[in-house]
Structures are given as structure tokens and as C-alpha cells.
Image (cartoon, rainbow, N blue to C red):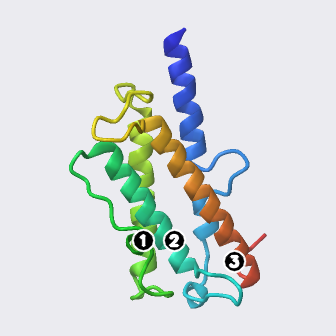
Amino acid sequence: MKDAHDKSLREHLLYLLSGGGAHARFEDVVKGLPEKVRGLKPAGLPHSAWMLLEHMRLAQWDILEFSRNAKHVSSPWPEGYWPKSEAPPSPGAWDKSVRQFRKDSKTMQELVANPRTELYARIPWSDGQTILREALLVADHNAYHLGQLVDLRRILSSWPG
């Protein structure tokens, strides 16, 4: 029975990490965003699409590295988790960030899917965090900012829905 519960929990986490359920999926949110609006910060909003994408990428990477690397040192908050500019610094920066986000998301999902990963065990170098907590943190953080990206796209008239 314990193995069935463990398998079920992992499946639920993977579903959540991939944007399942009532969450916008990363691929749907970034797909087709025109290059000309990626660096725009609409009046009244604190972030551009670029800022949100980079923040999500940086935070997800940090959580992943913390989860698997005892020598990882997190960046200073908040400056280490936000890009320095409102717009991508080069034409290829957006695509590079999207690719890295996908790669790190896949790696976090592989960590969760691995039956040798003890989801409830305290990460040895942590203050009590577990892989379960870190996976939920990634899913929650990404869902929140993907919602912001959807709103931003709607304001910029670049949301297909």
C-alpha cells in the first residue's frame, strides 16, 4: 500500500509541475508572444513579460539546485532573482530563457519521478526542507507568475484566448 501511495503522490506532483489542472501551462503562456511586447511594462504593472520569464527561470533553477546540490549558494534576494532590464538584452535571450526553463522543469520532474528520491526526507543541507516541499514551491511559484503573464498578455492584446 505504501508503494501505491508513493506512486500516486509522485503522479500528482508531476501533474502539478507540468501545469495540470486549473493552472495555465507554461507552453501555452509563452507560445506566440510577439517579440515587440516582451519588454513592455504596461502602466500600473510592475513587470514585463521578460522580467516574469526570467524571474521564473532564476527561481526555479535556484530551487532545483538547492534540492540536489549541497554546495549550491542561492543568490541574494531580491536582486539575484530578477533580470536587470525590462526587455531581453539580445534577440536570442527570450528563447534561451524559455529553453532553460523547460530543461530545469524537466529535471525537477525527473527528480520527483525517481523512486529513489525520498520526498519526505529532510534535505541534509537544508533547514528542514524536503523535496516534496521544494516541488510544491516550484509548482506554486510558477503557477502564480504564469497567471501574471496571462494577465499581462491580455492587457497587451497578445493573448489568443
Give the number of the disc on residue 53.
2
Residue 62 is situated, as x and y percent measured from the top left of the image, at: 37, 57
In the rendered view, tell whether residue 34 sits above or below residue 56: below
Residue shown at the point (55%, 87%) measured from the top left: 39
Give whichever of discs 3 and 1 has the lower sequence position: 1
Question: What residue sits right under mark 1 in the picture?
Answer: 97
Q: Secondary structure at mark 1?
A: helix
Residue at the right extreme, as displayed: 161
Residue 118 is situated, as x and y percent measured from the top left of the image, at: 38, 27
Q: Secondary structure at mark 2?
A: helix
153 vs 133, left or right, is: right
Marks 2 and 3, Cα distance to the nearest angstrom? 13 Å
Callout 3 touching callout 1 (CB < 8 Å)? no
Tell me the quarter of the picture where residue 157 sits: bottom right
Question: What residue sits right under mark 3 in the picture?
Answer: 153
Q: Is residue 103 visible?
A: no
Marks 2 and 1, Cα distance to the nearest angstrom? 7 Å
Q: Secondary structure at mark 3?
A: helix
Residue shown at the point (58%, 78%) measured from the top left: 49
Give whichever of discs 2 and 1 has the lower sequence position: 2
Residue 129 is situated, as x and y percent measured from the top left of the image, at: 42, 39
Give whichever of discs 2 and 3 has the lower sequence position: 2
Q: Amino acid at mark 2?
A: Leu
Q: Out of 139 and 28, give the one closest to the viewer.
A: 139
Residue at the left extreme, as displayed: 71
In the rendered view, tell whether residue 18 sits above or below residue 30: above
Q: Quadrant of the N terminus?
A: top right
Tell me the quarter of the picture where residue 83 sits: bottom left
Tell me the quarter of the picture where residue 78 sits: bottom left
Marks 3 and 1, Cα distance to the nearest angstrom? 18 Å
